[in-house]
C-alpha cells in the first residue's frame, strides 16, 4: 500500500507540476494578454456553473463508488455489474440536469443580459459542459478506485492544458475568432472523459452486462447504496459548490460581473497551486483508506492520516512561501488590470494551506462509517461560504470572496480535527508540525529582508531559490517527513546511477 501511494503520488505530482507550468503559460502569460477579463470570466463561469449542476446529476454515486466499490470489486465477475449500474444512474441524473437547464435557461439569460452579456449569449454551452463534467466525475472516481489515480491527474492537469494551449495559439494567429475558441474549448474539455473511458475499456474494467445478484448475496447492500448515495449527494454537491459558488456569487453581486470573475479566477489560480501535490496524494490515499475500512484495518488508516498531515503541511508551506513571497512579481506578470487581485491571492493561498494541513481528514470521515456526519459538515461549510460571501462581497469586493473561503476552510479544519480526535482518537499534530510552521516563518522573514530587483523574472528566481534553500534544507536534515526524505534519496540515487551509466558507456 505504501508503494502504491508513493508511486502514484510521485507520478501524479510530476504530471501536476508540468501541468502547472503549462497552466501558468496559458492562464497567466497568454490569456490575460489576448482575452478581455470578461472573456476569461466566461469560460470560468461556464465551468463553475456546470460543475454545480452536474453534481446533482451524479445522484450521489461518486460517493457510492468511492465508499462501496471495494464490496463490488471482482474483475473475474466484471465487478458484479458495477459499471452498468453506474451508467444507468448517471444517465438518469443527466436527464434531470437537462430538465433543470431548460426550466431555468431563460432566467439565467435575463439575470445576466446586462451585466454579463457573454454568458447570456453562450448559456446553451452549459449542456455539453454539464454532460462532460458529470460523466467525467463518475468515471474518474471509478478509475481512481482501480488504483489508476495518476492517470486522472495526467489527462486533467497535463493533457487538457496542452490542448488548451493549442487553442490559445490558434486564437493568437487568428485562425480562430473568439466564438471559434469557445467552441474549441468546449470540445477539448471532453478529452479527459474520452481518455479515461478508453483506459477503463483497455484494462478490461468496462462491462455493460447487468448483474444484480450481489444484492441478493450481500444482505443490506442495497439499503447501504441508497443511504451512501443520498448523503453522498449532499457531500458531493457541497464539495463542488465550495470551489464554484464564489465565482457565481461574484458574477451576481459584483458590479463588473464577468470582469470581476475573470480577475478573481486568475488570482484564485495562484492560490490553488498550493493544492497541486495533494490532489494526487488524496486521490490514491482515498482509495486505500476505503479498502482499509472494508478490511477493518484502522491502523493503516491512522498511519496514512498521520503521514498525510506532515507531508502535505511541508508541501503546502513551501508552495505558500513561493506564491506569497513572489506576489508582487506575479501581479507584474498579470498586468495592471489584475492589481486588485493581490489579497485574493493571499487569502485563497491561506485557505488552501489550511486544507493541506488537514491531510486526509476529509477522506477519513467520508469513507468510514461517519459519512452521514461528513455530509452534514460539508453542507454547513457551503452555507458558511455562501453566508460570508453575501456579507463580505459588498464590502470588500472579490477580496471578500477570498476571505469568506479562508474563514470557512478554517472552520472546516477545526471541525474535522475535533471530530477525528473524538471518534477515532487519532492525533497527527506533534512537534514536527510546529517545526514546519517555524521554518516557514523564518524563511519568509529572510525573504522580507531582500530588496526588490527591477527585473521581476530575476527577482522571482532569486527569491524562490532562497525560499527553497532556507525552508527545504532544515526540513530534510530534521527528517520532518520520512516519505519526502525517501523520495529525495531515491531520486538522487536514480540521478547518479543514470550519469554513472552514461560515463561507463
Image (tube, grey):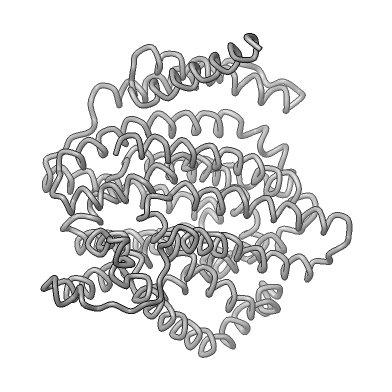
- Up-down relation of residue 274 to residue 119 (above or below): above
Measuring from the top left, give residue 367's x and y in whole percent: 24, 55
Residue 411 versus residue 485: which sits nearer the camera?
A: 485
| Quadrant location of the N terminus in the rendered image | top left
Left or right of 65 on screen, residue 51: right
Measuring from the top left, give residue 390's x and y in whole percent: 44, 64
Residue 38 versus residue 99: which sits nearer the camera?
A: 99
Residue at 31 percent across and 65 percent down: it is 79
- Up-down relation of residue 93 to residue 492 (above or below): below
Residue at 69 percent across and 55 percent down: it is 163
| Quadrant location of the C terminus in the rendered image | top right
Measuring from the top left, give residue 457's x and y in whole percent: 73, 27
Left or right of 123 on screen, residue 492: left
Residue at 61 percent across and 34 percent down: it is 327
Residue at the outermost right position = 174
Measuring from the top left, give residue 162's x and y in whole percent: 68, 50
Left or right of 413 on screen, residue 189: right
Q: How many numbered marks have been drawn onto this rendered protein structure?
A: 0
Residue at 40 percent across and 58 percent down: it is 388
Residue 121 versus residue 257: which sits nearer the camera?
A: 121
Amino acid at each position: 500500500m505504501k508503494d502504491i501511494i508513493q508511486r502514484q503520488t510521485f507520478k501524479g505530482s510530476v504530471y501536476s507540476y508540468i501541468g502547472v507550468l503549462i497552466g501558468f503559460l496559458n492562464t497567466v502569460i497568454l490569456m490575460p494578454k489576448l482575452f478581455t477579463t470578461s472573456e476569461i470570466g466566461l469560460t470560468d463561469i461556464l465551468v463553475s456553473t456546470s460543475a454545480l449542476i452536474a453534481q446533482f446529476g451524479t445522484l450521489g454515486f461518486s460517493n457510492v463508488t468511492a465508499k462501496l466499490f471495494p464490496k463490488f470489486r471482482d474483475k473475474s465477475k466484471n465487478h458484479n455489474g458495477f459499471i452498468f449500474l453506474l451508467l444507468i444512474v448517471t444517465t438518469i441524473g443527466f436527464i434531470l440536469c437537462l430538465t433543470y437547464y431548460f426550466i431555468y435557461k431563460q432566467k439565467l439569460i435575463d439575470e445576466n443580459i446586462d451585466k454579463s452579456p457573454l454568458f447570456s449569449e453562450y448559456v446553451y454551452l452549459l449542456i455539453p459542459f454539464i454532460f462532460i463534467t458529470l460523466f467525467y466525475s463518475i468515471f474518474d472516481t471509478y478509475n481512481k478506485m482501480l488504483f489508476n489515480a495518476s492517470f486522472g491527474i495526467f489527462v486533467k492537469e497535463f493533457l487538457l492544458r496542452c490542448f488548451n494551449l493549442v487553442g490559445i495559439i490558434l486564437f493568437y494567429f487568428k485562425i480562430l475568432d473568439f466564438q471559434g475558441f469557445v467552441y474549441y474549448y468546449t470540445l477539448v474539455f471532453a478529452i479527459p472523459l474520452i481518455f479515461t473511458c478508453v483506459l477503463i475499456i483497455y484494462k478490461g474494467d468496462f462491462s455493460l452486462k447487468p448483474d444484480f445478484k450481489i444484492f441478493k448475496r450481500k444482505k443490506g447492500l442495497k439499503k447501504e447504496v441508497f443511504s451512501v448515495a443520498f448523503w453522498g449527494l449532499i457531500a458531493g454537491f457541497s464539495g463542488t459548490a465550495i470551489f464554484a459558488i464564489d465565482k457565481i456569487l461574484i458574477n451576481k453581486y459584483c458590479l463588473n460581473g464577468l470582469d470581476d470573475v475573470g480577475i478573481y479566477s486568475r488570482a484564485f489560480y495562484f492560490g490553488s497551486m498550493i493544492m497541486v501535490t495533494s490532489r494526487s496524494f488524496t486521490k490514491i490515499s482515498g482509495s486505500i483508506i476505503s479498502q482499509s475500512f472494508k478490511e477493518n484495518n484502522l491502523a493503516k488508516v491512522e498511519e496514512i492520516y498521520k503521514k498525510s498531515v506532515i507531508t502535505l503541511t511541508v508541501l503546502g508551506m513551501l508552495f505558500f512561501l513561493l506564491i506569497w513571497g513572489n506576489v508582487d512579481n506575479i501581479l507584474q506578470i498579470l498586468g495592471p488590470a489584475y492589481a486588485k487581485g493581490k489579497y485574493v491571492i493571499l487569502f485563497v493561498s491561506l485557505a488552501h494551506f489550511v486544507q493541506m494541513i488537514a491531510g486526509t481528514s476529509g477522506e477519513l470521515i467520508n469513507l468510514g462509517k461517519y459519512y452521514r456526519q461528513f455530509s452534514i459538515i460539508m453542507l454547513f461549510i457551503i452555507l458558511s461560504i455562501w453566508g460570508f460571501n453575501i456579507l463580505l462581497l459588498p464590502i470588500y469586493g472579490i477580496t471578500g470572496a477570498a476571505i469568506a473561503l479562508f474563514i470557512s476552510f478554517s472552520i472546516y479544519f477545526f471541525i474535522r480535527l475535533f471530530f477525528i480526535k473524538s471518534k477515532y482518537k487519532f492525533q497527527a499534530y506533534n512537534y514536527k508540525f510546529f517545526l514546519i510552521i517555524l521554518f516557514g516563518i523564518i524563511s519568509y522573514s529572510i525573504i522580507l529582508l531582500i530588496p526588490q530587483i527591477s527585473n521581476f523574472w530575476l527577482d522571482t528566481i532569486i527569491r524562490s531559490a532562497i525560499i527553497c534553500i532556507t525552508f527545504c534544507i532544515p526540513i530534510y536534515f530534521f527528517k520532518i517527513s520520512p516519505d519526502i526524505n525517501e523520495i529525495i534519496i531515491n531520486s538522487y540515487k536514480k540521478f547518479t546511477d543514470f550519469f554513472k551509466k552514461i560515463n561507463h558507456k
